[in-house]
Image (spheres, rainbow, N blue to C red):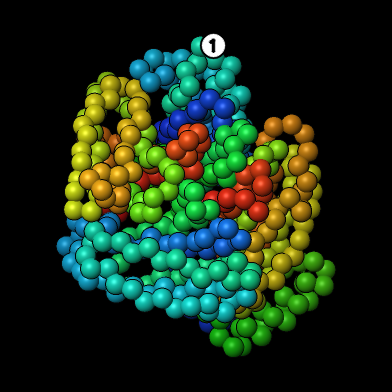
Amino acid sequence: MASPLRAFVRRVLGVVRTPTYYLPWLTRPGITCTLILHNVEARFQPGSNVGPFSVTAIQHDADGTMVRRYQTELTDSTSTVELALDPTRDGCGFVTVAGERMISDFFVTLSDGHDYTATHGRGEFVEHYPARARVVVRVLGSLLALVGRTIPAFARDQYLYASADSRSHLLLMNLSNVPNRIRVTVGGDGTALGATLLTLPPMGSRLLDTTRLAARSGQGTVVRRAHLEGNAWFNLYLVGAGPRDLAGPLSLMHVK
Amino acid sequence: MSSSLSALLSATFYERGDDHLVELIHQRDTAAHRRLHSLDVAVYDPAGKLLATPPVDPGREVLDLGALVEEIPGVPDRVMVAFDTRYDERIFPYRPHQYAYLHRRGSTAPALYYAVNAVLGGVPDRIGVTTMNNFETYLFRRAPFAERYSVLLGCLSRFAAVEAQVYAHYGRERTSREVRLEPRTHLEVEVPAEHGGERLDRVELKALFRLAAYVVGRRAATGELVLFDHLFTYFK
């Protein structure tokens, strides 16, 4: 959907965007997820560099429910807090982090206890649809879902990779308070290889095993194109895997 | 050259044995936006010697660095690869930089995906960073993981050497190392994970000019990459 049209529809529906900093999280058997909270990037910013800094983190599970609310404090702009996130049955979601005068990017790390991988979060927004708009989105979305489609309000494109001993998957996050139907199509060399329609609950997430949509073929590292469309604001992180795939050590990485 | 074109000079490091694929563009639906206007690729050894300028079709979307670099006779274990790009600004609508996929062949480590360092945007109002971007930092976890850390630095200047300082913070202690990079040279500055009984908290990089810089974490026993990330500027 073109940007001006999207902005117009948003106004008509009364959608409010709340600035939000969030990070993905992921736990698996043997894999723990820890945030590094800090405000070191404020070190040279007058007005922002004097602590203490109170920080609140809210961990949302894959079904959108709150797993836990964490409250912590940074004593000054060079102190850090490592926050170990609770594992859950679904094992993925996102965490929102808020605090006054916090102007730093926070880190999210995954570890198998031997080593760890890391990336950072995103300062974006969460969309809040009023009740009337939620009804409209639900009804329209349900009708389109009958034919495997969604309201293409937002679209993203992402390259995917697969080799004999590594691959990338997708962690999708619904950054809105409406169910988000996200249609994912995967193609390569001009051909469509697979498609799926996922329904993410409000503030929910889904780890998508991309090899189920398009099996690897050929030698070396195969590159595929994924195209994603959703009826509300969403984002994705790449999940990097090694030869043990999702049962082994993993990495998370932000995208453009 | 058209004045409507934007410019991007970026760089990464290729190490022997890696699967390393660089996304030269941002993936788009419209095929017309999937083509750079021009692309010059240059490969340098650590001493700054130009090893090759392999021709690459600017219409290519993803470039396999392994296939490109390992064909160069006598190539060392690590090289710096520079991408000098001219592009229609619709290709990089936000901050222009490329992304890449990285995994050591045969490694049990997970694949990594990272943002390639944009060293010089070429057009200041398009690079997204108008403040000082040569004073940066990065934080580490404090647990004693079996990893070793370093900062990989590359100098893309044409004529001037670049002096840089790498500071490592351990609790209240700080160590520093000064390095000087001649044009097109690169080096890996080791950052010990421990000092004086304290674990590494963070690293800082101060440079006279913008360098290609990555924070690196390797498995201590094998050297396989588990961290390959950009630093964060103090001045957003």
Q: Residue at x 76, y 61 (%)?
A: A196
* Residue B179: image location, x then y, percent: 24, 29
| Figure quadrant of the N terminus of chain B | top left
* Residue furthest out toward the bottom: A131
The answer to whether B153 appears left or right of B100 in the picture is left
Q: In the figure, B22 relative to A75: above or below?
A: above
Of all residues, the one furthest to the right in this rendering is A147
Say which residue label 1 marks.
B73
Residue at 61% across, 48% down: A241
Q: Residues within 10 Å of mark 1 (few under 14, many from 20)?
A: few
Q: Is residue A78 visible?
A: yes
Task: Determine the image quadrant of residue A107.
Answer: bottom left
Task: Identify which residue is drawn at 46% across, 56% down.
Answer: A109
Q: Position of residue A195 (x, y in %)?
A: 77, 57
Viewer can see residue A177: no
Q: Chain of mark 1?
A: B
SS class, disc 1: loop
